[in-house]
Amino acid sequence: MSSRVFPKEMEGTITFTRGVPPPEAFPIEDIGKCFDAAISNDPDVVLQYGHQQGYLPLRRELASEYGVSESEVLVGNGSLQLQDLLAACLVRPGDVVLTEQPSYDRALTTFRRRGARVKGIPVEDDGISIERLEEALEREVPAFLYLVPDFQNPTGVTLSTEKRRRVVELAEERGFWVVEDIPYRKLRYRGEDVPLLREVSAARVVTLSSFSKLLSPGIRVGFAIAPSALIVALSALGTETYLSPVLPTQAAVAEYLRRGLLEPNVERLKSLYTPRWQAMLDAVRRELPGARAFVPDGGFFVSVFLPGDANTENLAGRAQQRGLVLTPGPSFFAESDDEEAPGERFVRLPFCAVTPGQIEEGVKRLASLL
Ligand SMILES: Cc1ncc(COP(=O)(O)O)c(C=O)c1O
């Protein structure tokens, strides 16, 4: 019998699929203490129906962070549910919704489910192509444009300040909403923050974000910031859907913020993720030299377009047999005006929930399949 011993990373399946935090990212003790405090400090509110727009002390914290009034903040059960409510509110059957191409796969399915025709506008190294966006707007005005402007899911790119200015200008001129979805924004590993779209001009901007990537996805706390009239409409739809939001987790997050724990936790996460980000960038450079790689400054994802001559046939299926789990590239692609659909050549490489050793081995396995 062979007695070869493989390093741990070489064994077993390596998962490059969902962008989830690893278990070591959870601030278990502090969250536990905040849950205890939240329930004992305010049981009559947090254990009851109510606060349909979200737990008031948390809305106050968020309103102060974003420089808006409480009436412009809605806290719900994760940001994906708020995305769904937003699509339900803004999309009439047959309306077009524009997204980056590629885009967050679940957003695409959510918008389609609400009757939208979702059209993708190509992403460049500094975010969505303005030229292609302008061309699309000549044809029709969308119900909204959905963007993940910071460390985009799935590519990792960040929208430049100049492009942010032009996007909000177009939205105001042509009268459509821009949804900026920013769950990764605080996880920046290098460089300086770029202004939020709402900081450029808030009139037509809806901001969505979440505590899933900063604390825990399981607590399901996400929020929307938008003009009050839209928040009232979203909240009414929320009440019809889930009666009232899950208040104990919102109260625990409010307590976590009140104790000043978020910033140190974000710093801890950045220290945990930076070596993984670096390992992914190094592995992609080394193992996939012919690929077009997007190099992010933060977030959860590196991504590549494989070279035209790479063997991409049934890539996810063949990868699975080699112990590598990939999300099929086409899931991130909406309908587009381009003849060629490059989805087959697109690979998203989430790096936060895998160790540097697994990253190195996983990218090697990917390269061996091409
Ligand atoms: C861009 C983006 N938006 C929204 C979500 C969902 O966040 P939540 O857990 O708050 O529903 C994710 C999760 O991966 C995401 O990447």
Image (spheres, rainbow, N blue to C red):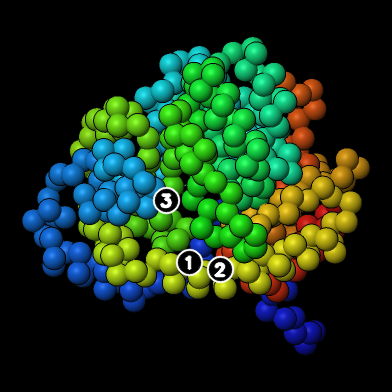
Label 3 belongs to which residue? 210
Residue drawn 34% across the image and 76% down it: 29
The amino acid pointed to by label 3 is Ser
Q: Secondary structure at mark 1?
A: helix
- Dot 1 or dot 3: first in sequence order is 3
- Dot 2 or dot 3: first in sequence order is 3
Front-most of 325 and 206? 206
Label 2 belongs to which residue? 270
Q: Among all residues in the image, which is located at the extreme bottom?
A: 3
Which image quarter: residue 214?
A: bottom left
Q: Is residue 369 above or below residue 328?
A: below
Residue behind label 3 places its C-beta within 8 angstroms of ligand 1: yes
Front-most of 282 and 265? 265
Residue behind label 1 places its C-beta within 8 angstroms of ligand 1: no
Residue drawn 73% across the image and 39% down it: 124
Q: CA distance from mark 2 to mark 3?
A: 17 Å
Residue drawn 40% across the image and 31% down it: 86
Q: Is residue 38 above or below residue 346?
A: below
Instruction: Report x, y in % for residue 188.
Output: 58, 60
Label 1 belongs to which residue? 266
Instruction: Report x, y in % for residue 101.
Output: 66, 34
Q: Is residue 96 above or below residue 122?
A: above
The amino acid pointed to by label 1 is Val
Q: Are marks 2 and 1 in contact (CB under 8 Å)?
A: yes
The amino acid pointed to by label 2 is Lys
| Left/right of residue 317 with respect to residue 150 in the rendered view | right
Front-most of 205 and 233? 205
Q: Among all residues in the image, which is located at the extreme top?
A: 139
